[in-house]
Image (cartoon, rainbow, N blue to C red):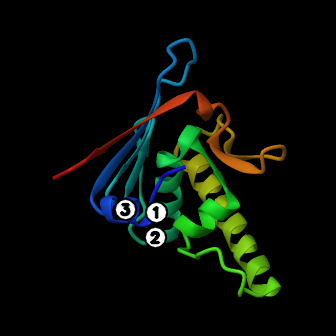
Amino acid sequence: MVQGYSDVLQGLGRGRVILASSDQSVNFNQKLEVIGTEVCFGGQMIDLADFHLTLRLFRLFAIAKYGRCNLKEILTFVYRLQPCSTHTARFRKSARVRAVKLLSRARSLAIKHFDDGLDWFSYDHQSRTWSLYEGCELLHVHQRFHA
């Protein structure tokens, strides 16, 4: 994933994160862009100014290595929860449920506003990770920031 979450969080305030295809043989000519509070994909745009957690989730997947994240990364980046052994089992379960609900809501938004033919935020049981969409591990991640 990324080295320092706090560095990334500070750098993404007005940042532009682009996820674009690096393999020309695969028909993924569309790209995901996170520009400020707007998420763009395939010529469509969603303004997530009022949905801070969903915006952080899209940003996380845009910067994640191979577009994949596990639950620990989602909880740390989106909810800013630090791994801690002092959390109760009930709190940990509640955090997991909130993360899965957020992924479900983001999936619904992506299907509604972007490409409904893609399997958005798909879960891989073997690696226990989510991907931005099925096949996104073939993508190359670029980051650019506005001044």
Foreground tag (2 vs 1): 1
Q: Could you classify mark 3 by the number of other residues whose Cα lies within 10 Å: few (under 14), some (14-19), or many (20 or more)? A: few
Instruction: Give whichever of 6, 99 is nearer the camera.
Output: 6
Circles 2 and 1, Cβ within 8 Å, touching? The answer is no
Foreground tag (2 vs 3): 3
Amino acid type of the residue that numbered disc 1 sits on in the rendered structure: Tyr
Please say whether residue 105 is visible from this viewpoint: no
Gap between marks 1 and 3, in whole Å? Answer: 5 Å
- The residue wearing badge 2 is 52
Gap between marks 2 and 1, in whole Å? Answer: 16 Å
- Tell me residue 111's x, y (percent): 61, 47
- Tell me residue 120's x, y (percent): 65, 44
| In this picture, residue 75 sits left or right of residue 97 | left
Q: Secondary structure at mark 2?
A: helix
Earlier in the chain: of badge 2 and badge 3, it is 3
| In this picture, residue 118 sits left or right of residue 146 | right
Gap between marks 2 and 3, in whole Å? Answer: 18 Å
Please say whether residue 135 is visible from this viewpoint: yes
Amino acid type of the residue that numbered disc 2 sits on in the rendered structure: His
Residue at 31% across / 59% down in the picture? Answer: 11
- The residue wearing badge 3 is 7
- Tell me residue 29's x, y (percent): 47, 24
Amino acid type of the residue that numbered disc 3 sits on in the rendered structure: Asp
Instruction: Give whichever of 128, 14 is nearer the camera.
Output: 128
Instruction: Give whichever of 2, 12 is nearer the camera.
Output: 2
Q: Could you classify mark 1 by the number of other residues whose Cα lies within 10 Å: few (under 14), some (14-19), or many (20 or more)? A: some
Considering only vertical position in the picture, is 93 above or below 30?
below
- The residue wearing badge 1 is 5
Circles 1 and 3, Cβ within 8 Å, touching? The answer is yes
